Structures are given as C-alpha cells and as structure tokens.
Image: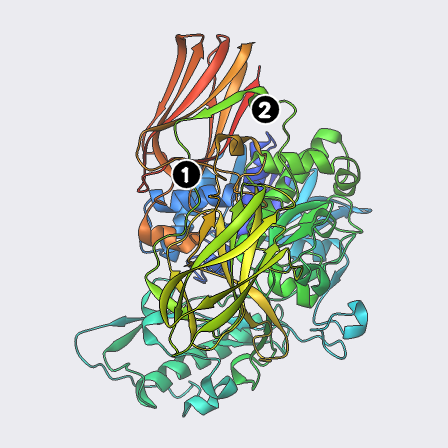
Amino acid sequence: MQRETNIIEENYDVVVIGGGLAGICAAVAAARQGRTTVLVQNRPVLGGNSSAEIGVPPHGADQAGSYRNVRETGIIDEIAAANVTFPNHLDSPSIWSLVLWSFCRDEANLTVHLNTHAMDVDVDGTRITAVAADQQTTEKHFRFTGAVFIDCSGDGFLGYQAGADYMTGREGRDAYGEAMAQDKADDFRMGNSIYMRARKVEQAVPFETPDWAHVIPGDDSLPNEGRSCPHPIEHLTNPRGGWWWMETGGRLDTITDAETIRDELYRRAVGVWDHLKNRGEHGAENYVLESIMTMPGKRDSRRFYGDYVMVQQDVEGGCIFDDTVAYGGWHIDVHQPDGIAGDIYWKGRLLNGIYTIPYRSLYSRNIDNLLFAGRNISASHVAFASARVMLTCAVMGQAVGNAAALCLEHKCSPRAVGQQHIRELQQRLVEQDCYLPGVVGRREADLAQSATVRVSSEHVLSSPQAHEYIPLDVDRGQMFVLSEKHLRDVTLPLANSGESDIKVRAVLRAGKRIDDFTSEVHLAVAEATVAPGKHEVSFAFDCDLPETNRPYWILLPATKNLSWAFTKAEEPGSQAAARKDQYFTEPGTEQLMHRERGTLGFTLNPASRCFGGEQVLSGVTRAEAATNMWCSGDGLPQSLSLSWEAQVRLSEVQLTFDNGLDLPMGKWCQRGQSPSLVRDYRVLFFDGEEEVGRIEESKNRLRRRIHAAPSAPVTSIRVEVMATWGLPQARIYEVRALPE
C-alpha cells in the first residue's frame, strides 16, 4: 500500500538554493534586512567546495595571500573571525562547516534546511513561485514559496528548471574577442578535482595498490612531464590536504556525468598515491593515506545570462563598472579539459589588479525574480575562470541578498533595482563593510564629517628594517603614499657587488591606487652612482607632485651586479613590485609590473605623514588611493576624538578597525587574531567636560563594530585604544557618528 505524502508548505520572502559561501552570504544578508529567508542545502554540511565533504580552501582576490589590501570583508570577514573564535586553529574543513552552520543558526529571520534537495520548480509566466524539495534524512517533502529566489547552487539547478537562459562550455574567440578564448566554441569544461590527505608516522608503511587504480609509472606520465604537478608530500598532511591538479572530467558533462567523474577521480587519486609510495623517490616511505574526500570539487557547469556578460577584457582591464556590487582579483585560471591526463594542464594570466563585478551579471535576463551568485554568474568561460573562486562568490552573495531585500522594499524586479536603486544597493553594501572599488561611503548623514578630529599621535611612513638584498635581475618598484606637495629626494639602500661604479637611473611615477603599477608616465627622473659595496643612495627628484596624499612609485631597471635592500615586513601605505611574465604557460610573451609581498627599502624626504586622523573620514575603509587609516605612533593607549562646536544628538557610533587585510583568511586559523586588530577599547561621550556615556569592550575580534550612543546630547566623543592583539599601534580605518 502506498503511503500518503504530506507536503509541508513554508512561505518566505527570499528563497536561497545552495549552501556554499555565496548562498550563506546571500541568505544572511537578506535575513539581516528583516526578510524571512530560507537557505536550502542538499548536503549534510554547509560550505560547498570548502565544506567537510570537499575540503578546498577558500580563495579570493588576494590570491592566497599573494596580494595586499584586497582581502574580502563584510559577512565573509565575520565568518572568518568566527572560525578563529570557535577556535579552528588547524583550519579543519569539518570544524569550518560546523562554524558555518552555527553562524547561520544564530541569524534571526533565517531558516536552514540541510539534506534538502530541490526537486522541482513552479513557474508562472516569467516568475518563479515555488520550489519543491525533499529532505532525505527525514523523508519530509517541502514546498517553499517566496517573492524573490536566489540560485547559489553552483550548477544552477533552480534557474535551469525555471527556464532561465544559460550557457555552458567554452566560447570561441569570435563571441567576445577574447585573446584567451578557443579558436572555435566547444562544450568542454574545466574538470573536477578531488582532495586527499596523508599522515606521517614513525615507521615505513607499505602500500598495496588495488587493481582498479590508475598506474602512473613516472613523473613524465603526469601533465607537462610533472612540472605542473609538484610532489611535496608535506602538502598532504594539513587539514585541507590535496593537490588541485588531481582533476578530470572536462570532456564530460560535469552534471550528468558526475558519478562517472567521481569514480574516475578515485582511480586517479589512488594511482597518484601508488606513484608516490611505489614508483620513484618521493620521500613517502613513512606516510600513510588518511583520507580521500567524499566529493570532488566542481569548477564548471552552467552559467546564466544576465543583462551583461563579463568578458576577459573586463577582468584583465580592471574595469570599474558603474553598477559594481562586488570585486575579484584571482588570476585568469583556465583549466584545460583533459586535466591530469592532458599535456597542457592549464592556462593562466596574471592581472594588474582587481576588477569589479556588475550587478547586471547577477540576475536573469528572462526570469523576472531570479538572482544568482557564485560560479553560475553571467560571464564568459574566460572571465568566469577568475571570478569563480569562493571568496569572490561570497561577496557576490552578499550583494544579491541585499538586492533581494530591495526588491521587496520597492516592490520591483531585480532588473529595476539595478536601473532605479543601484546607488542605494551600493551604499548598503559599503555600510555593511563590503569593499566596492570606486564607491565612497555615504557621508551626508555622518556627523563625523563636520567634526574636528584630534589624535594622540600619528605614525610617519617609514620602511621597515631590511634583512637581505635582492638582485635587480628584473625591473623592481616600490610604492608609497606621499603627503607633501614637493618631493626632494628618495634614498634607497643599494649594494654593488661589482668592482666598478654603476650608474642608476630611477623613475618616479604615479599610481591610481596603492597597488597600481601600470603607469608608464615619468613624473621625474633622477640619476645616481653606486660605488662597490653597500650604500644609502639618494635620488634627487626635486619635483612638485600632481596631488598630495596619493600613491607614487619609484622604478629601478634591471641592472647587473646591483641589489636593493628587502624585508618581508610590510608597512601600511606601501607596496613592492617586480616585472614578471604575465602568462603562466607562455613565458616571455608579455610582462607586467606585478605586485609583490615584502618591502624594498626607502627613505622619503620630506617624510610622509599620511596616517593622520582625517583619514577616518574618507569614506573608504582600506588602503586604496590613500591610506584611509589613522595609525598612531608606537605605544598604547592611544586616542582619537571628534568634537563639535555645538551639541549634537547621536544614534550610534560605527568603528572600522584594521584586522590585517594583508593576512590571507586561511592564515587566521594558524596565527589567531591579526596583530593589528584593536582588542580592548572604550568610547567616551562628553557634553563639554562632563562625561555622559561610556562603552567599554575587551577581547574584540571583529573589524567593524556598531555601538548605540547615549540619549544625551554630546559635544565630543573619544575612542581610546587600550590594547591590540599584538602591534604597539592603534589603527582605525573609519569612525562614523550617525544622528538620531
């Protein structure tokens, strides 16, 4: 006898399908705008490719810590802080998934359904009305109705079932004129990868290989004769152990052939382990195979058409769209369809800097109430190859979650939000600590803008003490923010290893932002002679600058026998660079001045005072075209005050601290809190000399804090930094004082 099926009806304002980082950020963002929201995830854990089932570390615009000042903030930054607080010191994917579940569980207005697979979609004309889903663990059947739907499922199941226009495969060069596109279009895709983990033990352990595993006799049987597939076995011992190059399935359909691809990846993963243990000298004798992840990580399947399709030229050119709502910066990372079995594994192209993602690429062009975020956005195969990484997907998610809330507030479609309310959407994102290049935070209602700012002390830009000299085997550059109108000279610590004098020609150029080394315009040129040995060499530019409080950089050309002092330490307001091949797989074809970690030594005359208290009023909360940060001198406590000529009434005070945007998210777990983050502080409110309110915080772990102000009128407030998590300086990006 067939049992009766009971369907549980649940109605929400916003329905989000997919519990990866994009879906989590979308759902939390919508819920925080007061909208009832459901997050439907078909797996037992949250996190998507970063979850306990797949274990890929999240990456974003900072390219795993290669670039400074560009790490993602907003909701994903809060999640990263929660991951440290839990604590997840080993960066375990299992604990990470638990942190994500806890983060969503604590959010008001948000309901999470795990193990719940969307099965069918109801559509009325060009609008989605409901999603039917089954929860495997409970045998429950749900029907989720809503006003706005967001597809963060990766494969785009929701949009596909609703009839949204989509694309797959690789476009031909004639489609968008992309240099990295194929000669002709095809339906090939980037493959899936599987991660495995190993453990070192005290004694040698043999490995008996099952007969179903692939045989990989030598390194020359791997892509590019093994050069694309490094074998440092220690990489397999961390919690996110794995090699991204264990990839296959690009010539199949990564959706309908997913089971076949997974089985093949098992064969190849075990074959690689057999290769390490039994076929060559790889130092694997005392290692045992601990785990192979239960699911492969997927890169590529469906991408929806929005009103705009992002292309290579947008990504490579660092396009700043008028309707920007997110940004990316990962290199163009096009994996070839044959994966581990191919001769050419991937094609990569470095970027000059970050680029923005337009809102028009995050909603469907033909389904009226469908938004999307993640690896299914409206982008060509080449552009998507950069934008598909998880932290970039997360900031897209926060954007569409807020857009969904605006759809409900204004009773309009996602398209109408872009056409009529894009500035409102952008300002909401900025106020939530999302970084939008080219967008300054709204300041009209901020009473801090009319206040006088005073600080206890102010740091002066200086180069950290160098610990080595690196050769000028390529052109090298060093950026710094200059506060004065006239630059007399820059002194560089140089070493001449030859036996005769070397003449050096230094060039001064301007940057649009602190990591922009694209300019070829000489503002000034200076020459100097370097005698054999180590010297402090002065370059007398003696020039007026076009603007103050802006970034400028000095370029030294590649010079035989000459070295420049270098340190891995990094000063805010500075950035190093070196000339490098732009194409990973085609050396020497094109080059660019590439952002590098560390600092090349310099001394500025006059000194640059670019960390004053006025920086907290800039409306930008990271280094960009200026430092945008008050940085005190050494020694705590330190303070910053705002004062008004007449009484004002405040509703809240917002503080944005420096939590180490140079530090990649994955390193938080290993190191704990960022040393630069303010730990203990207080906010004092005064009416004249009388204290009328006080807020005290200890063991702060968040970059952005919002505090209610006292009901009494005030004439000044003072932020006192008592301690940080390590640095002897107080660093604050922004103070906002909002009126009643």
Q: CA distance from mark 2 to mark 1?
A: 22 Å
Closest to the observer: 247 or 645? 645
Q: Secondary structure at mark 1?
A: loop
Residue 35's place in the image compared with 384, above or below, is above
Q: Quadrant of the C terminus?
A: top right
Closest to the observer: 705 or 534? 534
Could you tell whether 727 is left or right of 416 in the image?
left
Choose top left, top right, bottom left or bottom right for residue 148.
top right
Task: Give the number of marks.
Answer: 2
Could you tell whether 509 is left or right of 147 in the image?
left
Location of mark 1 (residue): 459
Q: x and y percent of residue 384 in the render?
A: 65, 62
Q: x and y percent of residue 160 in the render?
A: 71, 58
Q: Is residue 345 visible?
A: yes
**How would you rate the neighbour count of disc 1 (Cα within 10 Å): few for under 14, some for 14-19, many for 20 or more?**
some
Location of mark 2 (residue): 449
Residue under the image location 60 percent in, 50 percent down = 543
Tell me which amino acid carries mark 1.
His
Residue 30's place in the image compared with 644, above or below, is below
Looking at the image, tell me whether mark 2 or mark 1 is earlier in sequence order.
Answer: 2
Tell me which amino acid carries mark 2.
Gln
**How would you rate the neighbour count of disc 2 (Cα within 10 Å): few for under 14, some for 14-19, many for 20 or more?**
some
Q: Is residue 153 visible?
A: no
Q: x and y percent of residue 195 in the render?
A: 43, 69
Closest to the observer: 366 or 451? 451
Mark 2 vs mark 1: in front: 1
Q: x and y percent of residue 306 in the render?
A: 76, 53
Q: Quadrant of the N terminus?
A: bottom right
